[in-house]
Amino acid sequence: MSPLPLSRGDWLRALVVIVIWGLNFVVMKWGLESLSPMLLGALRFAGASLPFLLWVPRPTLPWRTLVAYGWAQGVGQFGLLFLGLHWGMTAGMASVVMQTQAFFTLIMAATLLGESARRSQWLGLGVSLGGLLLIAGSHGEGARQMTLIGFVLTLGAAWMWAVSNMVVRRAAQAGAYDPLGFIVWSSLVPIVPFFVLALWIDGPQQVWAQLQAFDGRALFAVTYLALLATLLAYSLWTRLLQRHPAGRVTPFSLLVPVVGLLAAMVLLNERPAFWQWVGTGAVIVGMGINQLGDRWRGFGR
């Protein structure tokens, strides 16, 4: 059975996710100015779950699925990403490196779930990977240069994102469920681990001091990350993964660096190097090959 074509609604969902997640990295940097990585993670997922539990029903999925997703997407992905941003990863570069999840996901989906991938998908991802390598290899100059530890942690976060994509695809194969409920209830899982890590790493006094100094920028960051980047964007992302194979959905995230690099340049005064822009162009070309490769081949017949 051939997969369903992407509808206009699917394209709109993908566009909204791209914009929200592209701006997401700048907002994370703002939040980390006054909050530690672990405390920011705890507040993010508390805001995405606790206010909604009374009126959003739990999805008809086993608890093990919710816990697996909460650990992979919450503690794993964002714990590593927040640490990477805290330890020298620039916002623009983070938006790029995180998109290696598309390659991890395609490989996992093919090997673990038996999802077939077209040659145009592999070619498109290969072109995009070349673009990502160009961007990652051009570190820039000065204090805003990407650090090695920041790169490694962010690459680990991308791997955990791919793992969470596999959990979503497994859940979709088991039957239909509500994406919003899935995100709300799985967001419960990371709260306690993040708070425990914050108390262990920062110490109770430092955690309390951060909460006392909670200002408007921190409130904006937590609200954006909880409501838009988590509830809205991941609900839309989950809906796309329910309807389409993972190898077809995840390449949309390759456009996130375009928004991320521009946002970091305008809002954080980060200045991408020439080869970073060349790499961004390659990412866009690879995305086009991935999504439209078969159509182009058909036009040439």
Image (cartoon, rainbow, N blue to C red):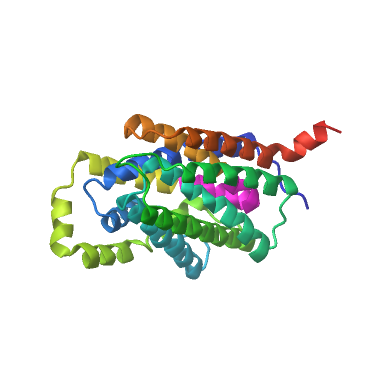
Q: Nearer the viewer, residue 24 or 263?
A: 263
Q: Residue 272 in the image: x percent, y percent? A: 42, 35
Q: Residue 20 in the image: x percent, y percent? A: 44, 39
Quadrant of residue 45 within the rendered picture: bottom left
Residue placed at 62% from the left, 53% from the top? 246
* Residue 5 horizontal side relative to residue 225, left or right: right
Q: Residue 46 in the image: x percent, y percent? A: 31, 55
69 relative to 99, above or below? below
Q: Which residues are magenta?
A: 233-251
In the current view of this chain or complex, which residue is farthest to the top? 266
Residue placed at 54% from the left, 34% from the top? 278
Residue placed at 46% from the left, 55% from the top? 155
32 relative to 77, above or below? above
Q: Nearer the viewer, residue 194 or 266?
A: 266
Res. 178 in view? yes
Residue placed at 38% from the left, 64% from the top? 189
Any magenta on residue 227? Answer: no
Any magenta on residue 240? Answer: yes
